[in-house]
Image (cartoon, rainbow, N blue to C red):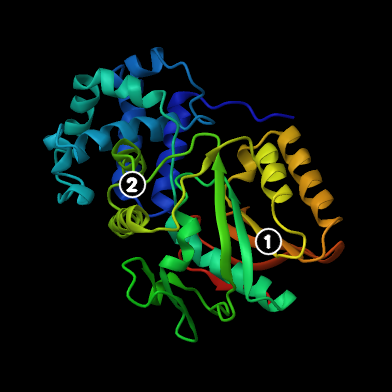
């Protein structure tokens, strides 16, 4: 049975609670204030009256927040920028008044924002990808693999070997990288990231892909980062800059996941390993796409000699967990094996299985 859609008021309160739990006190306060403003028949009530998308499932609160953050990032809303760490500010006593005024002033920007799909490319999730790549490499005894990602957004996680990862026990990647995962990027016990295979090729797809070379797409990505999570913001900005200078960067294809994976797998030689990856995307696929995707992967494995891995980082209550299926040729050797968990943004990755 489908879950009933929340009202805009309740979607705001739910998003406030989520932001509070996930470390964004600014957005927690703003969404809570917007819910009250809606009840008080303020500007948020007028936005609610004209809402044409589903408040919860289409992430209306985050679409609005992205539109206002975008204005702050481009210098068009200095009264907002003064409160956001992402633009060099700090939250002050007039935060809520200034935010509600911005909603009333920038009505066109808010309307544009409401039709813009929330797009994030959480580079922190590469900590989970590295943990899975390493497990795959050790499990099947390979030092090279193709990498394919669905729900790839801007394709920044496919640049995993351009970043630097150090668990304290072992390291992987470029030692001089600006995007770095050290110290509190890891939970305890730390995963073994030794023996990560190098990448023979990398490609991704998304239903609404972004291109790191496109300035408007860059702004879209940055605007959806919560403005008081400065580490996330700078990490994403550095990853975009890295992609713009990386010869291995290729923007994701605009394709349905099941159709795309069929096309991609058909062009990989049967004697070369491949690892398929996705993170916080499975819940957004239709049942038909999920069934077709599974069938494509299983049919592909039945006809090949080399190992295939299906690695996925998806919600597991308050955290995301990392699971893998592995085939050695046509024989399945690992099924839905849990490897690690982390925050939804990928930070705090810890080992759950050897």
**Tag 2 secondary structure:** loop
Residue 129 circle label: none
Q: Residues within 10 Å of mark 1 (few under 14, many from 20)?
A: many
Q: Nearer the viewer, residue 1 or 310?
A: 310
Q: Which residue in the rendered view is the most extreme toward the bottom?
A: 169
**Residue pointed to by mark 2:** 226
Q: Secondary structure at mark 1?
A: strand
Q: Which mark lies nearer to you, 2 or 1?
A: 1
Image spot of residue 272 (x, y percent): 71, 65
User: Where's residue 232, x and y in %?
Assistant: 35, 56
Q: Quadrant of residue 216?
A: top left
Q: Is residue 270 visible?
A: yes
On screen, 42 above or below 336? above
Quadrant housing residue 32? top left
Q: Residue at x 55, y 56 (%)?
A: 202
Number of labelled discs?
2
Between 300 and 150, the one lying in front of the other is 300
Marked residue nearer the N-terminal end (2 or 1): 2
Q: Quadrant of residue 5?
A: top right
Q: Residue at the spot x=57%, y=59% of the render?
A: 201
Q: Quadrant of the N terminus?
A: top right
Residue 92 at x, y = what percent? 14, 45
Is label 2 in contact with label 1 (beta carbons under 8 Å)? no
Residue drawn at x 20%, y 27% is 102
For the residue pair 212 and 20, the one nearer the viewer reads as 212
Measure the alpha-carbon separation of dots 2 and 1: 34 Å
Q: Quadrant of the C terminus?
A: bottom right
Q: Is residue 224 above or below residue 335?
A: above
Residue 345 seen in the figure: no
Does residue 267 appear left or right of residue 242 in this picture? Answer: right
Q: Which residue is mark 1?
A: 274
């Amino acid at each position: 049975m489908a879950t009933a859609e929340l009202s805009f008021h309740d979607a705001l309160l739910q998003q406030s609670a989520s932001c509070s739990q996930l470390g964004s006190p600014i957005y927690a306060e703003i969404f809570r204030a917007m819910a009250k403003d809606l009840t008080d028949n303020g500007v948020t009530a007028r936005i609610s009256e004209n809402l044409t998308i589903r408040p919860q499932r289409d992430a209306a609160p985050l679409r609005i927040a992205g539109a206002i953050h975008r204005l702050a990032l481009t210098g068009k809303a200095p009264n907002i920028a003064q409160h956001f760490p992402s633009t060099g500010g700090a939250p002050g006593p007039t935060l809520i008044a200034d935010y509600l005024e911005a909603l009333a002033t920038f009505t066109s920007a808010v309307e544009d924002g409401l039709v813009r799909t929330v797009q994030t490319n959480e580079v922190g999730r590469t900590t989970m990808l590295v943990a899975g790549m390493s497990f795959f490499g050790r499990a099947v005894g390979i030092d090279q693999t193709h990498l394919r990602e669905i729900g790839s957004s801007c394709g920044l996680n496919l640049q995993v070997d351009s970043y630097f990862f150090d668990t304290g026990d072992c390291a992987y990647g470029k030692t001089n990288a600006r995007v770095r995962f050290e110290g509190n990027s890891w939970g305890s016990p730390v995963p073994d990231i030794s023996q990560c295979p190098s990448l023979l090729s990398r490609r991704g797809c998304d239903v609404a892909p972004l291109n790191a070379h496109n300035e408007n797409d860059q702004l879209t990505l940055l605007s959806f980062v919560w403005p008081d999570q400065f580490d996330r913001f700078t990490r994403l900005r550095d990853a975009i800059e890295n992609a713009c200078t990386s010869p291995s960067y290729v923007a994701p294809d605009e394709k349905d996941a099941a159709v795309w994976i069929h096309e991609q797998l058909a062009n990989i030689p049967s004697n070369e390993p491949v690892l398929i990856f996705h993170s916080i995307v499975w819940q957004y696929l239709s049942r038909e796409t999920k069934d077709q995707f599974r069938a494509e992967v299983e049919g592909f494995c039945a006809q090949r000699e080399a190992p295939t891995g299906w690695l996925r980082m998806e919600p597991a209550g308050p955290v995301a967990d990392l699971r893998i299926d592995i085939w050695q040729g046509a024989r399945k050797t690992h099924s839905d094996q849990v490897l690690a968990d982390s925050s939804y943004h990928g930070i705090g990755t810890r080992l759950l299985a050897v």
